[in-house]
Image (cartoon, rainbow, N blue to C red):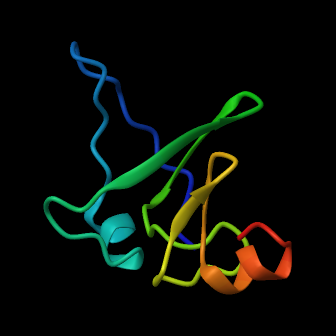
Amino acid sequence: MISGLVRKIDTTGRIVMPIDFREQLNLKLGDEVEINILGNEILVKAYRPGCYLCGAQTDLRPYRGFQMCQGCRSGIGAL
């Protein structure tokens, strides 16, 4: 795990993600990242859309604000 780097925020609010981080997450130019606040920390992770419960990538539909696959929707009776 790579950690402990300090970066400055530029005048437009950006920071540069080091290439080692991008390579570890297999991020390429134009890929999307998800940014969240967790307490007093900022969590940045590779955006991989999928079912909220199981991570499946197919047959996704919104259910109560979350993307869910048919299997999980069936399992909770949400069809």
| Residue visible at 69% across and 81% down in the picture | 54
The quadrant of the rendering that contains the N terminus is bottom right
| Residue visible at 63% across and 46% down in the picture | 65
Residue 13 vertical position relative to residue 16 in the rendered view, above or below? above
The answer to which of 78 and 28 lies nearer the viewer is 78
In the image, residue 33 lies at what x, y percent?
38, 54
The answer to which of 55 and 7 lies nearer the viewer is 55
| Residue visible at 77% across and 31% down in the picture | 39
In the image, residue 51 lies at what x, y percent?
60, 72
Residue 5 vertical position relative to residue 78 in the rendered view, above or below? above
In this view, the residue farthest toward the front is 79
Q: How many marks?
A: 0
Left or right: 53 with respect to 62?
Answer: right
Q: Quadrant of residue 68?
A: bottom right
Left or right: 43 with respect to 26?
Answer: right
In the image, residue 58 lies at what x, y percent?
46, 84
Residue 16 vertical position relative to residue 55 in the rendered view, above or below? above
The answer to which of 62 and 21 lies nearer the viewer is 62
In this view, the residue farthest toward the top is 11
In the image, residue 59 lies at what x, y percent?
48, 80
Left or right: 11 with respect to 9?
Answer: left
